[in-house]
Image (cartoon, rainbow, N blue to C red):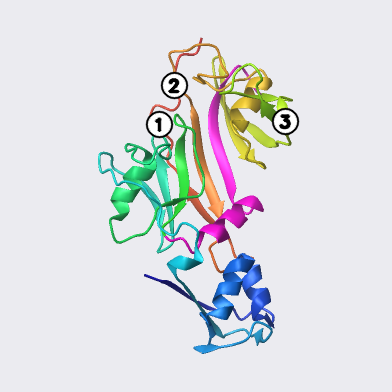
Amino acid sequence: MQWTYTQTIPATQAPMPLRALLTAWLLPSHLVHDLRIHQRVLVNGSYRTMNQPVYAGETVQLTFVPSDFKEPFPDVLPDSAATVSVLYETADLLVINKTRGSKTHPNQPAERGTTLNHVAAYLGPDEPGPYILSRLDQETTGALLMTKTPAVVPVMVRNIAEKRVQRTYLAWVRGTLQGQGTFTGPIGRDPNDKRKRLVNGVHAQPAVTHYEAVDHQPGATLVKLWLETGRTHQLRVHLANSGHPLVGDPLYADPSQDRLRLHCWRLGFPQPWTLDGPLTTVTAPVPADFAIFHTN
């Protein structure tokens, strides 16, 4: 098995050395090295050294093989017990609408019943994936980004790390929250509960969450949330610390009959093998019961 990608250099792109192009495409240095020594990068069908320039209109072909990757084939058992709601799909990328109550991925090798198991069944035996790129808590719904091949995993991981992937959430929170603003409290571990995180907790790391109030009902506010960082439970911790915990949050709010009301509403991400192109935007429909809960 191998994975081949062919990309034509846009007319607007200035000439640059082949190595610089591959680096700008966010390929890690070890993959650039493998492509070079095995001559699996071709320009207009012929091998070209890494220092030679590539020009607009030329065609670059990359071929990857399983030995290029530490774990080319994820060990995920397919489970067709649940239908996968696909929001976006290409030969490389997949965005699904995760349901409430479904774990994102298995924690044990033989585990089934998670979203990743269901996606593996959807893709079928001929696809090497799925490879998880983003995670959502078990009770969180919405857009979840994956890849279908190992070649684009390091590229998309870099895009996430360098904040080129934009995540927008919708959430119902307790109380009346007005206007817009930013939470900046650093988040660390809760010394009294290993499940939880805490603003200014143990080994706190910087965390930035932007919010905007968009609707109200008695005793609750619908907020739109943007993440600049990706700390564990970041949205839940920042909102609870502000005095407006998420409706139905089992860890950070008062006991409630409601389930968590947090939805990854929109994902914006660049396509692999592009420079400064427009983001692809995918929106996940909000669950039908999202605004139905106890208002006490």
Residue 169: in magenta span: yes
Residue type, mark 2 in image: Arg
Circle 1: residue type: Arg
Q: Between disc 2 and disc 3, whose residue precedes?
A: 3
Nearest to the eye among marks 3 and 1: give it: 3
The secondary structure type at the circle numbered 2 is loop
Q: Residues within 10 Å of mark 3 (few under 14, many from 20)?
A: few
Q: Is residue 260 left or right of residue 9?
A: left
In this rendering, position of residue 41 left or right of residue 113: right
What is the span of residues highlighted in magenta in the rendered image?
Answer: 149-177
Residue 123, magenta (yes or no): no
- Give whichever of discs 1 and 2 has the lower sequence position: 1
As helix, strand or loop, the secondary structure at mark 3 comes to: strand
Residue 215 to residue 19: above or below? above
Q: Is residue 227 visible?
A: yes
Report if the CB atoms under discs 2 and 3 are less than 8 Å apart. no
Q: Which residue is mark 2?
A: 259
Q: Is residue 183 visible?
A: no
Q: Amino acid at mark 3?
A: His
Q: Is label 3 in contact with label 1 (beta carbons under 8 Å)?
A: no
